[in-house]
Each structure stands twice: as C-alpha cells, then as structure tokens.
Amino acid sequence: PVHATARHGATSAPARGFTEPAKKSLGQHFLVDRNIIGMIVQAVNPQPDDRLVEIGPGQGAITFPLLARHGRLTVIEFDRDLIFPLTEAAHAHGTLRVIHRDVLEVDFTALAQDEGHHADPRIRLVGNLPYNLSSPILFHALEHAAVIRDMVFMLQKEVVDRMAAGPGSKVYGRLSVMLQAYCHVTPLFDVPPGAFRPPPKVDSAVVRLVPRAAETIGIRDHALFARVVRDAFGQRRKTLRNALSQVCGSEAIEAAGVRPDARAEQLPVADFVRLANLLAEQRS
Ligand code: SAM
C-alpha cells in the first residue's frame, strides 16, 4: 500500500486552484500523507461497476487518486470556496460530479436511484469526515443503509474505538450498538495527526462499515430500537429496569431474556434487538 499513490499523482501540496486556508468550523484537515492516501484508495479498491460517492472532498486529496484509479466519482462538498476548483477539475476529468450541499441534506436513497440501472445500484461511500459531524453523518448513513454497499471513513480514533467496542468495554455505548446492529464494523488502520494540514489535535483511524442485509438486521421498528438503545445508555449507571422505565416494565425485559438489573454496558447487541422487537410486537 505504501507505494500505491505515487502512480496517482497525489502530492503534499494542495492541488492547483485551491488557495483557501483551512476552515476550522467545517472540520477541515486536509490529508497530505501519500502513504495514507494510498492505503485509503487500496481499502476502497474500486471495481469497474462501483458507484463511489465521496463526502467532503476538500482539496481532492482522496478524490483525484480515486478518479485516476476508477474514472468516475460523485463528491458532496459544503464549502462554497472549494466548489469552484472542484468543478474546474470536474470539467477537466469529465466524470467527476460535484454536489454542493450539506451532506446531512443529501438523500442517499434518491442519489442511488439517480443514475440509471446498474447490476448493483447501491453506492459506496468514502470520506475523511469533518470530525465535528461524524456522529450525525454516521446516523444519516444508517437511515439509508439499504442503498449503501459499504463505507470507508476516516474518523477520530476515539470514535472508531467506540464504534467497534463490545459489551464490557469502557467505551461500549449507544454508538457501538447502533452501528453494529446495522453494519459489520472493521477498524482498518490508525492515522497520526501529522498526516494532515493543519494537524488535528487527536489521533485518527480508518474504518470499514458494511451494512447488513435487511433480513439479518431483523429490527421490526427502527425508531423504537433507537429509543431503547438511547434510553438504556442515557444513564449508564442505572439498571435497565430504571433506565428503560419510560419505555417498558421489567416483565418485558425479562420476557426478552434479559436481566432487569443488568446495565446497558453489559448487554450484547442481539439482546437490544430482541428486547426492542418484543416491545414492537406487544405494541402492534
Ligand atoms: N477529503 C479531504 C482530505 O482528505 O483532505 C478533506 C477532508 S476534511 C477533514 C472534511 C471536508 O468535509 C472538508 O472539505 C469540509 O469542507 C467538508 N465538510 C464539512 N462539513 C460538511 C457538510 N456538512 N457537508 C459536506 N461536506 C462538509
């Protein structure tokens, strides 16, 4: 992977036409480390019919190597000042589609339906995400999990650790349960602050998320499931009986095969699914 980018022409200087300083409010930390860029491209490993969508292309650190490799890409960027140089590059390459929008307002399901018929219409998301928005972007993607084949994201390492944690871990929480209920979560590699300009204050990590098939997720009522998980972890110190008192009684918890005096941080993902499904059944 270490040599992968040399061919793609990534450099440590911003691409021509990008003159704006990085904006803190938009979480802008531009990748400049060629090896890391190469490792991300390799992790994505685009195949001919893939429909790649990049979130936050910035100055194109990942965009242009991906384009060189794959030839076709849709990017979603919010910063007006970056749109012009990206659009110019789009003209040069012809196959770069630039969507100037807040990614949280982009309907991925509509986007997936947008571009004609494909053997597999699902999109593949890539992004070195703005860290101030990582959780909202992840939850937004989960809502559209059915049209997403996989995601390769750079995030704060601490967030990746939480996403991948199991019961009993100090960092096992709402993010772990929500992500793992819908996706296979595989941390790929860590990235030090020095790989970015300007360097962020924290370590970063790249993670792969592969949404599970709807049948294997098996959640009957998604809003109810999200509510159960949120309340259960709302007060970590509390027993489930107390934490979930607004949603159900301890009989329901027991009926789902879960001990009411257990705490959310000890409960495997499957138990949350079983409990939420039992409640959904009782309500229907
Ligand atoms: N991909 C580039 C790289 O690796 O160098 C830039 C990554 S930078 C961490 C995050 C990018 O997301 C910035 O370009 C920023 O302008 C963009 N961004 C921030 N908020 C956004 C939003 N709500 N919707 C779309 N893009 C956003």
Image: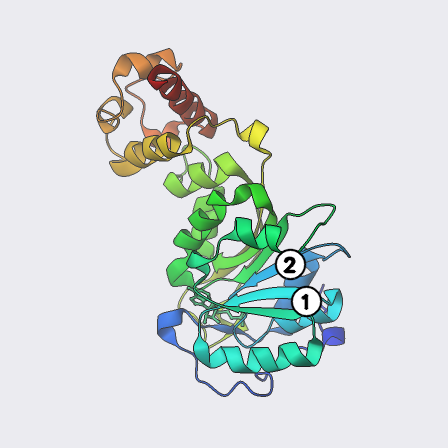
| Near-viewer residue (238 or 181) | 181
Residue 199, image quadrant: bottom left
**What residue is rendered at 49% in x and 34% in y?**
181
Quadrant of the frame with the C terminus: top left
- The type of residue carrying mark 1 is Leu
Closer to the N terminus: mark 2 or mark 1? 2
Separation (CA) of disc 2 from disc 1: 9 Å
| Near-viewer residue (153 or 117) | 117
Q: Position of residue 28 (x, y in %)?
A: 44, 72
Element type at marker 2?
Answer: strand
| Near-viewer residue (271 or 236) | 271
Figure check: 11 above or below 38: below
Query: Marks 2 and 1: which is nearer the front?
Result: 2
Give the labeled residue for mark 1: 66
**What residue is rendered at 74% in x and 67% in y?**
69
**What residue is rendered at 53% in x and 43% in y?**
145
Q: Is mark 1 within 8 Å of ligand 1?
A: no
Residue 233, image quadrant: top left
**What residue is rendered at 39% in x and 53% in y?**
136
Q: Residues within 10 Å of mark 1 (few under 14, many from 20)?
A: many
Give the labeled residue for mark 2: 52
Q: Position of residue 78 (x, y in %)?
A: 45, 70
- Tell me if label 2 and label 1 are in contact, CB under 8 Å: yes
Quadrant of the frame with the N terminus: bottom right
Question: In the visual, does 32 lie left or right of 94?
Answer: left
